[in-house]
Image (tube, helix red, strand yellow):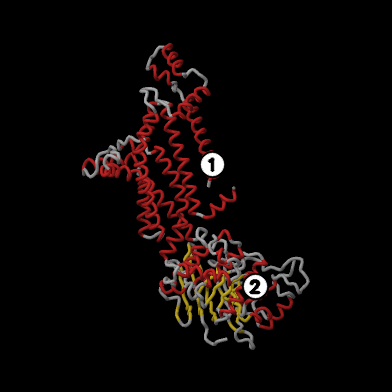
Amino acid sequence: MLRFVVRRLAGMAIVLFAVSVLIFLIFNVVPNSNPAQQLAGKNARPFLVKNIEEEWGFDKSLPEQYVTMMKLVVNGELTSYEPRIPVNDRIKEGIPATISLSVGAGIIWLFFGILLGYLSALKPGGLLDRLLTAVAVAGISIPVFLLAPVFIYVLAEQLELFPNGGYVPISEDPGEWFKHLILPWVTLAILSIGFYSRVLRSNMLDVMNEDYVRTARAKGLSERKVMTRHVLRNSLIPIITLFGLDFGATIAGTAIITETLYDINGVGSYAADAVTNFELPPIMGVTLYGAFFVVFINALVDITYAYLDPRVRLGEAAAE
Amino acid sequence: MSPEPLLSVSDLQVGFATEGGLLQAVDGVNFELRPGEVLAIVGESGSGKSVTAQTIMGLTRGHNSRIEGSVQLDGEELLTAGDAAMRKLRGERIAMVFQDPMTSFNPVYRLGAQIVEAIRAHRPDTSKADARARVVELFDSVGIPEAERRVDDYPHEFSGGMRQRAMIAMALALEPEVLIADEPTTALDVTIQAQILRLLEDLNRERNLATILITHDLGVVAEVADRVLVMYAGKVVEQGTLDEIFYDPQHPYTWGLLGSLTRLDRPRPKRLPQISGAPPSLLELPEGCPFRPRCPHEFSKCTQVPGLEARLPDAPKHCDRCWLTPEQKREKRHVEGQIGLEAPA
C-alpha cells in the first residue's frame, strides 16, 4: 500500500509538471497573448507596453518566467493580472459549489445509469429494453446548453417549481442548497445516465456469455441472483473506471456550461472567465487544480478496483 | 445393474433459430442411464454432445430454441417442468462439471464462497459456517491439499487441475444423482487428466453416481465408460457397450475416430490417420447420411438417411446408422488395417 501511494504521488508530480509546462507553452505561442499588451490597453504607446513588460517580468526568457510562476503556484501566491485577485482565493470560493454540483450529479448518474442499464440487459430486445434505449439515446443526444434553458424556462420560470439559478451554500441553508441544485444535478447527469446505461448494458450482455454465468445457473441459483451477483457485479468493474474519469473531470471544473447557465459560481465558471479574459495565472491555477483532482480520483479508482477484482491485487503484489 | 433407468432421454430434438434458419443441433437422441453407470458421449465439436447435456439441465431453454422429445429423471418429465422446478433440480439432483476450469468460476469471488452459494441456494437453512465446513470436507474428498486454508483462495490462485477438482467438489456438494461432465479433462495437462479421470471414476463407484461423460477423446472413453454414444452432426451414429464400440465398431465414422488414436501396441505410423474434411454445417446438411461427403465407402443407398438400428444378430443393443451390411463392414474395416479411414500418406 505504501509503495502504491509513493508511486502514485510520483506519478501525480510528473503529470502536474507536464500539464503546467504544456499550458505555459500553449499560452506563449498563441497569437496576441502578450499580457503586457492587454494590460496596457488598446492603442497603447510602445514604451508603455515595454514598461509593463519590465515591471511584470514578461521580458525575461520563457524558462525564467516559468520558474517565477511555479514559485508563485507552490507558495499559493498566484494572482490574476487585472484586477489583482489571488487565484487561490477564487478557486477556494468555487470549490464548495463545484463539489456540491459534482457529487450530487455523480450519485444521480451512477445510480440511474446502473439501474437503467441493468433493466435493459434483463431482456435484450424486449419492450423495456427498446424503450430504455430510446431514453438513453435521447439523453446522450440532448446538449446541456439546450436542456438547461428548457429546464429553467419551463420548471423554474413558468411552473416556478425550482429557483431560477444561483447557489446557496449548504452551511447557510441545506434546504435551499438542495432546491437550487436539483436542476443543475439532473442537467449534468442526464448525458451520463444515457451513456452509462448503454455501456453497462453491453458489458452485461458480454458477461452473460461467460462460462461462470453458465456455472451459476447450473448450480441452481435463482435468475435474480445470477443476474445481480454474477452478471452485474462483474459488469460494474469497467463502469467504475469510467466513473472515475468522468467524476474527476467534473470536480475539476469541466461542468462549465452547467455552472454558467445556472449561475453557480464554481470552479468551472471561474475557468470560463479566465479563458475569456485570457490571463495565464487563473488558467494555470484552474488547470493544475483540475489535473490534481483527475489524478487523485483515478488513484482512488485503482484502489477500488483492487477490491472489486482480486486478480488486480495479485498483479499489484507481483509488481512489487 | 438395476432394471429401472434413472435418466431416460428419448427422441430428443434441439433446434436453434438462427439468421440462417433453424439449426438442428440435436436430432433424435435416445439413451438410458442407470445409477453407477458411465455413459460416454463422443463426437467432434458441433456434433451436439454438449447441447444434449445442457438440454438435460434445462440450460438451453430460451425464446430462440425449440426442444422436443422427452427427458425423464426418475419418471419425472424435465422438458416440460417449470423453470422453478428445474432450478431446484440443477445442482441438487443433476450437477455438471464444465470443460474449462479457468473460466468456469467467477474470478471475483473466493472458491469456497462460490460453493457455499450453491449449497445455500438449495438449503437456505444451512448456516454459512456449516456450509463452509462442508466445502472443506468436499475439498478434502476430491484431493485438494490444505483444504481448510484453500477454500478462501480465489480461482486464479488455483492451478488448472486443482480448479477442476474444486469444480468437481462443487458438483458433488449436494450429492446429486446424475453427474454430467462436459469435457472435464480437455483443458488439462495429460498427467492431470489421468488424475481427474481416476477421481471421477472413484466417485462414480463410491457414490453410485449416474455419470454422463462428454468428450472427443476416445482414450478417456476407454478408461472409464461403460457405454458409448457416438454423435455426428446432431445424430447418434452408433451406440453400444464399450467393448462393442472398441472391438466391433460398425460405423465408418467410429472407425475414423478409432483409427486416429495413437496406439502403443502397433508400429508407429509416419503420420496419424485422420478423417478427411470437416463436419457439415448444421444449416446445410447433405442429403441422406450426414457423414456421406467424408465417407470413403459411400454407395448408392447413402442418399437416404439410415435409421439407428441394431444390425448385428447377436448384439441387440449395439445400434448404428450405416447402410453397409455387417459382413461388408468387417471386410472394409479389415482392408483398412488399422480401422482408419485414410491410409497414412
Output the chain of dot 2.
B
Q: Which type of secondary structure does the marked residue at label 2 adopt?
A: helix
Q: Position of residue A145 (x, y in %)?
A: 33, 39
Front residue of B244 and A293: A293
Three-letter amino acid code of the residue under disc 1? Val
* B172 is higher (above) or lower (below) than B104: below
Q: Position of residue B329 (x, y in %)?
A: 68, 80
In this picture, residue B7 sits left or right of residue B332: left
Which residue is the site of mark 2? B220
* B174 is higher (above) or lower (below) than A267: below
Spatial CA span between label 1 and label 2? 54 Å
Residue B12: image tag: none
Graded by Cα atoms within 10 Å as few (under 14), some (14 to 19) or many (20 or more), the crowding at tag 1 reads few
In this picture, residue B3 sits left or right of residue B315: left
Front residue of B83 and A274: A274
Three-letter amino acid code of the residue under disc 2? Val
Q: Position of residue B43 (x, y in %)?
A: 60, 71
Q: Which type of secondary structure does the marked residue at label 1 adopt?
A: helix
Which residue is the site of mark 1? A6
Q: Position of residue A122 (x, y in %)?
A: 40, 60
Front residue of B336 and A107: A107
Which image quarter is the N terminus of chain B in? bottom right
Task: Give me the residue at 71% from left, 68% from top.
Answer: B273
